[in-house]
Amino acid sequence: MDGILNINKPAGKTSYGIVTMVKRLTGEKRVGHAGTLDPMATGVLPICLGQATRLVEYLMDTTKTYRAEIELGVSTDSYDREGAITKWGDASAITQEQLESALDSFRGVITQIPPMYSAIKHQGKPLYELARAGIDVERKSRTAKIYSLELNNWENPILNIEVTCGKGTYIRSLANDLGEVLGCGAMLKNLERSRCGIFDIKEAVTTEHFEEACRGGYWESLLYPMDSILSLWETVIVGEEKARAIRNGALIMLAENKSNKAESEFCRAYTWDGSLLGILRFDTAKKQWQPEKVFN
């Protein structure tokens, strides 16, 4: 079974726990999620099944939107409410003008230092394992892109923001860094992912609904076609000769208007019967299309 589920992850569950649940209920062995949500976080968690697991990387590259509740005046070692408090600060004198100015510094391309409580590996071990053992290691800063950052509500010391960002952005780090800029400290209190690529929270399925669908035998109707996440890419339909070349991994020429340049790095190729054949990447040096992924 190939497709993608738009699951609304509840608080207290790990992303891997949702994957395990889907495996158990569907019997599908090939299951993976597209972008980890912390246990305390809720919201959109795309779950890929079957051949769709080979598209996880493209889904993770899409933009994501979060609604975050941040508390000023307190810092923790995990940058969120589940960590140990490391510092108290006074946020009573913070004005909205100061807050707006501080938020403005996080729009566009920014640098972040990943939190110790993250899945990034150091010498083969996840940072969160080292953090739990009381070990703090130096982390390299990373760039992140914030497409939009809006202040939805503020009642000192609690503010609510909506962030649309690119791959690899840590909202916990953003909250902590905001506290550093304001000089009073801050932590992430609550987090909801409201969108991941084409998947929106409004259409997301709760775990209870999914379990009910599995008991009722209609869970497959909740699947999105796996190529739905590629909808912004150009589509090409190929005949049997080019289809055979693609299956063999050979470079191919497409229609004349696509042979010398490509508007996008990727395109999706279909056979005449409408089946997704593969993902092609444009080779700028050879001016031909190279099969990147080929599907059964």
Image (tube, rainbow, N blue to C red):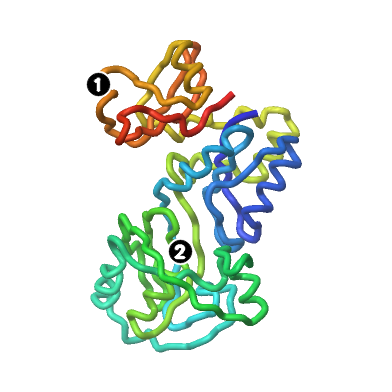
- Quarter of the view holding residue 169: bottom left
In-image side of 204 versus 70 (left or right): right
Crowding near the residue tagged with mark 2, few <14, some 14–19, many ≥20 C-alpha atoms within 10 Å: some
Residue beneath disc 1: 257
The N terminus is located in which quarter? top right
Q: Nearer the viewer, mark 1 or mark 2?
A: 1
Give the residue displayed 71% in from the left and 47% down from the top: 20
Give the residue displayed 25% in from the left and 21% down from the top: 257
Dot 1 or dot 2, earlier in sequence? 2
Q: Position of residue 285 (x, y in %)?
A: 30, 35
In-image side of 30 versus 136 (left or right): right
| Residue type, numbered disc 1 | Asn
Q: Position of residue 230 (x, y in %)?
A: 43, 33
C-alpha distance separating marks 1 and 2: 41 Å
Q: Position of residue 101 (x, y in %)?
A: 24, 73
User: Which disc, if any, is residue 170?
Assistant: 2
Give the residue displayed 39% in from the left and 70% down from the top: 159
